Image: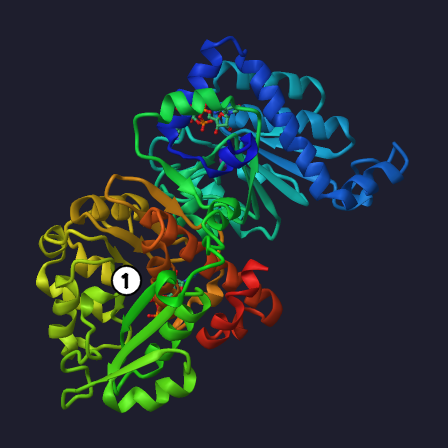
Amino acid sequence: MEDRQEQISQVVVTAVQMRNIEKRIFAAGMPVVALMEKVAGLIARRILEIFPTLLQNTFSIPPSLRGSPQAGGSRIGILVGPGHNGGDALVVARELHFRGYQVWIYSPFSKLKELTSQHLQYAQSLGISIYQTIEQLPDSDLLIDGLFGFGLERNLTDPIASAINQLNELSVPIYSIDLPSGLHTDTGEVLGTAIRATHTFCLGLWKLAFFQDQALEYLGKAELIDFDIPLADVEAVLQDVPRIKRITAAKALATLPLPRPAVTHKYKEGHLLLICGSRRYAGGAILTGLGARASGVGMLSIAVPESLKSLLVSHLPEALIVGCPETETGAIAHLQLPENTDLSSFNAIACGPGLTRDATPIVQEAIAVDGPLILDADGLNILAQMGAIATLKKRQAVSVLTPHTGEFQRLFPDVTDTKHDRVKAVQEAAAQSSAVVLLKGARTAIANPQGGVWIVPESTPALARGGSGDVLTGLLGGLLAQAATKQIPVEDIVVTAAWWHSQAGIIAAQERTELGVDAFTLTQYLLKALT
Ligand SMILES: NC(=O)C1=CN([C@@H]2O[C@H](COP(=O)(O)OP(=O)(O)OC[C@H]3O[C@@H](n4cnc5c(N)ncnc54)[C@H](O)[C@@H]3O)[C@@H](O)[C@H]2O)[C@@H](O)CC1
Ligand SMILES: Nc1ncnc2c1ncn2[C@@H]1O[C@H](COP(=O)(O)OP(=O)(O)O)[C@@H](O)[C@H]1O
Ligand SMILES: [K+]
């Protein structure tokens, strides 16, 4: 049984699910007002921890100067919306006021929810300044955004929209409560305009927007404020719906190291066939091979055009390089496997990187094999031409697709627009095709045909570089081949590979800067990510 914190950190909810969880807590007797105090108290405490210099400034100066501009960095503006997000912000305002900060409030709405209105009234009684228009606002060192949380229902309009635009222009850090105001809680879309936060305190459970690429530049550094939501309430609300999960380190590492008995041999530890490369794209085959090497796969065979054979041997001496006859353009013309070997001899096949579309017959042949198959790059483009859904539906064995957004759109032109909602798009694609689909991006999302989704919660733009996807295909292929000989669900392996790949990128970027993570270097960091 995983501990509570681990389980909570895997949960991702929509606005409706969060509302239903909240309803159960209130129905069970937790007073709304008490929960707001608790949550906002935790937020205020985190703000004080994150700004220790502010705190020191505040307490090391005489009370008469506390909160004055001379104190330095202690002027805090609180942005208050009409709902309970605004209520949270007002409780934070009150607490910071009591700790000696110079606090002011921007409250542009005339109608507030009752609890929010009461907190505003009390703040006013304490002598905290309240402003209704953006022009009146004094300077500040920090803004706290409590305009809207998961209750935002429609596009923001003026005057609040233009106020947000002006606040974004100030060079002042903004800390958002629950999520940056203006973002759709589920899709991460900007509803008219949105606060560009420096830091966001996500309350209670991770909301889906935190894992949608389009939201990332608005979120800043994201952190979960755990306010002890009972797991039973989470389970009750989520029990009948396919889960969307954050991939935690514990989850990813649970399948690694793959259990390897003391008495075993190379063919028992997975035999992977990579089908990749062309005279035009030779490097892709090497990178895929190096990704597979890092997986620890027992036996690695790589089918490439004959003219690439010696190059591949020099980079991957441990692999069995299968040189194949090639077309005039330098693509594999047909597979020429060693004697006594056919495509069903392998525990997994990964097909695509660097093939070019001239290798269409080879991809068709691989798809026809009754064994675990990963398709990437031109493997996917060729599949799209064949009609992805109809072709995949005919396969009995597991298919794993690893498209980036462009490939995804070619494969699944009829599913939800990835610009609108990447998570829903990958979920629909997996359900329709019966494949495990990994949609690459800043936040890679993986879906199985049953509707389950897993999202890589952290990565680095250092990976946005030619060839890093090839490394992932090799790594995934190697893990899948090993898993095929054990009882490990395919989606767990895909999840592990995607997390591992991102972690290697993060560690490499930390050591070498974001510019220092070329795809070859990335392969050198894969094992470092596990140690
Ligand atoms: N879920 C929980 O258990 C908790 C939630 N809390 C807070 O409560 C928030 C949710 O509160 P609410 O449900 O009141 O929702 P919000 O505070 O997010 O905002 C809803 C209010 O904004 C109005 N509104 C929506 N869209 C608008 C638009 N485009 N223009 C103008 N007004 C608009 C609505 O009519 C409503 O009055 C969370 O984000 C969080 O900050 C916390 O107080 C404590 C616990
Ligand atoms: N902004 C980003 N942040 C994090 N990871 C990214 C970003 N952009 C791309 N990646 C990752 O880099 C890899 C790129 O793969 P792909 O698009 O197939 O490129 P290539 O075919 O050149 O290898 C994917 O794993 C993707 O998730
Ligand atoms: K907010």
Closer to the camera, 77 or 331? 331
User: What's the residue at 60%, 65% (across, down)?
Assistant: 510
Identify residue for label 1. Answer: 348
Q: Is residue 8 above or below residue 194?
A: above
Q: Secondary structure at mark 1?
A: strand
Compare residues 497 and 52 and report the one nearer the observer.
497
Above or below for 490 versus 31: below
Q: Is residue 189 visible?
A: no
> Would residue 296 appear left or right of 136 to someone viewing this image?
left
> Percent x, y for residue 102?
73, 34
Q: Is residue 229 above or below residue 407?
A: above
Quarter of the image where the C terminus is located: bottom right
Q: How many numbered tags mark residues here?
A: 1
Residue at horizontal 76%, vertical 26%?
Answer: 98
Amino acid residing under circle 1? Ala
Q: How far across and how far down the image is residue 387, in percent?
A: 10, 59
